[in-house]
Amino acid sequence: MENVGVEFFDSAVCDELAFYVYRLIDPTTGETFYVGKGTGNRIWSHLREALSGTDPTGSEKHMRIREIMNAGYVVNHEIVRHGMNEAAAFEVEAALIDVLDPDSNKVRGHGAGRGKATSQEINDRYARPTIDWDPEHKLLLINVRRWNRDMATLYDQTRICWRVSQQRAEKVDYVLAMHQGVVYGAYVVHGWAVATRENFPEMNVDEPHRKAFWGNCAPDDIWNLYCGERGKRVDNKRLFNGTQNAIRYWLV
């Protein structure tokens, strides 16, 4: 099974493709479980990593690939759009992630604050006050991918679990929870630890390559400064333009 389903594009094909956006599909359900972008033979890299057994992160994407292969099937690879520059590929990738909502894409994609939203959500978002980005505090902003607007759920989804630099994270004064470009929550951190069930019993699986924190809501004056009553909009291109990262630091 070592090379089952693994293919390669030759140099001529790679030249024609330029930047492209692709999706990985579960043949048993037809479900898209991952969307990515790249050049050359990037599309095949996830399959090779999953089958080689050298994946150091135990990612959901690689586990899904192995489950499909162990069941006797081959992951379907589809190129959705090609012949683009990198900027266009970022946008196509983000749009597909918004629409398909693949389980294995932990991050929303390029320009997450400009993603899928209803007309009411767009109006609410841009009618909100904007955070004054000359903050006096050291901040860690976390893009929360899914949130049902329940504040207790927001806290749990903000603190578990992320690829953060613990050394940098421990320098921050407050963690801000952002969803679709709006900050809804501010938290004081009491401590960071490896995201395992031993440290956080409420977790379903161990994520030893990620971190999580314990904390509580920030004081009212801090909450009002960064969140207000209905959330405040992040409007700083230096922080979020051109990045897929779920984590951004603002260390003054």
Image: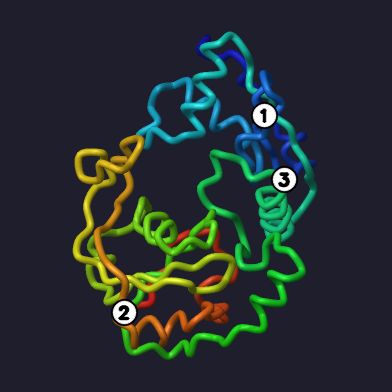
Label 1, label 2: how many angstroms apart (C-alpha)?
A: 41 Å
Q: Circle 3 sits in a helix, a strand or a loop, which is it? A: strand
Q: Residue at x 79, y 44 (%)?
A: 81
Q: Earlier in the sequence, mark 3 or mark 2?
A: 3
Q: Which residue matches tag 3?
A: 20
Q: Please provide percent x and percent y for residue 43.
A: 63, 35
Name the amino acid type tagged 3.
Tyr
Camera-nearest residue between 171 and 144: 144
Q: Nearer the viewer, mark 1 or mark 3?
A: 1
Label 3, label 2: how many angstroms apart (C-alpha)?
A: 37 Å
Specify the label residue 25 is tagged with.
Answer: 1
Q: Which residue matches tag 2?
A: 138
Q: Please provide percent x and percent y for residue 170.
A: 23, 67
Q: Earlier in the sequence, mark 1 or mark 3?
A: 3
Q: Please provide percent x and percent y for residue 155.
A: 38, 61
Name the amino acid type tagged 2.
Lys
Q: Please provide percent x and percent y for residue 108.
A: 58, 54
Asked if residue 73 is positioned above or below residue 151 in the image, the reply reads above
